[in-house]
Image: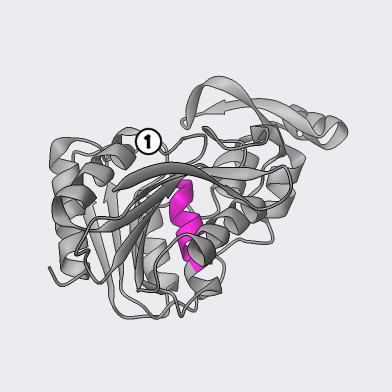
Amino acid sequence: MTNKSRLYYSSKEYLAYNKNSPQNANKYGLIFLGGFKSNMNGTKAQALNEFSIKNNYDLVRFDYFGHGESSGQFIDGSIGLWLENTLAVIDNLVEDKPQILIGSSMGGWLMLLAAIARPQKIAGLIGLAAAPDFTEELIWDHLTLKQKNIIEEKGKVEFSNEFCDDPYPISLKLITDARNHLLLNKEMEIKIPVHLIHGMEDTDVPYLTAIRIAEKIATKKVNVNLIKDAGHGLSRIEDLEIIYKTIFEMTDK
């Protein structure tokens, strides 16, 4: 059964989510964490939903604050808030069974943070072009001095890069809050299996990021799968088949 609903985490704010709960579901549940400015109806999210139904997996996909059908404005969001959203989903929407987090781009950053925060609930991680620390390395470091002055004076600036063709507002809050959650500058206390899938033609997030994540994770159970001709989306049929195979391997199916 699939249902679409809302998870309220204050009197006004809520997360839109879709939960698929088939009968005789696998002993592992799946949670999909989408990317920056994406939503739960994207190509990969929809494909994973179909996959979960066909193969009897519980799956939760949802929109962060200010994304998709959830409440709030994107400009008011932050990594810390989106992490709180992710933890709220883990704490309130999934069955009492080990969960596999599947994090796409920014969702890959959030999955790492969530695994550190909820080690007893997370059994494995699958990163799809995971992008930890992107606010610092792919946004802040690419702002001009003029843009940095504007964001520090006005609290936001119009910015565009490979994440989005059209300019969009980036807030000072997004940048400064994210500095409390940077991961690539230290060892990550993650001791569960981790599988990182990254396209070598990714022009949004350098594929070497996957190697850097692997180096910083405490566990030795890390696999890095570099797909030479894949880009950032990882939504081609051949890319999806690799993701499905990885889920089977992680869930003993």
Q: Is residue 108 magenta?
A: yes
In the image, residue 70 sits, relative to residue 251, either above or below, namely above
Between 18 and 105, which is closer to the camera in this rendering? Answer: 18
Which colour style is shown? one colour
Left or right: 186 in relation to 35: right
* Residue depicted at x 68% and y 57%: 179
Taking the view exactly as shown, the residue that stands out farthest to the top is 166
Residue highlighted by disc 1:
203
Taking the view exactly as shown, the residue that stands out farthest to the right is 153
Between 246 and 41, which is closer to the camera in this rendering? Answer: 41
* Residue depicted at x 61% and y 48%: 136
Q: Is residue 131 magenta?
A: no
Instruction: Name the chief secondary structure element in magenta.
Output: helix
Q: Magenta residues, as a range?
A: 104-114
Pinpoint residue 211: horizontal percent, then vertical percent: 35, 62
**Residue 203 appears in which quarter of the rendering?**
top left
The amino acid on which the numbered mark 1 sits, given as a three-letter code, is Thr
**Residue 227, visible in the rendered structure:** no
Number of on-image labels:
1
* Residue depicted at x 28% and y 48%: 1
Describe the element under mark 1 as helix, strand or loop.
loop
**Residue 194 appears in which quarter of the rendering?**
bottom left
Q: Quadrant of the C terminus?
A: bottom left
* Residue depicted at x 47% and y 59%: 93
Between 148 and 38, which is closer to the camera in this rendering? Answer: 38
In the image, residue 133 sits, relative to residue 35, either above or below, namely below
**Residue 28, visible in the rendered structure:** yes
Count neighbours of disc 1 (C-alpha within 10 A) and say few if under 14, some if 14 to 19, many if 20 or more: few
Pinpoint residue 233: horizontal percent, then vertical percent: 32, 37
In the image, residue 69 sits, relative to residue 121, either above or below, namely above
Between 95 and 190, which is closer to the camera in this rendering? Answer: 95
Left or right: 120 in relation to 59: right
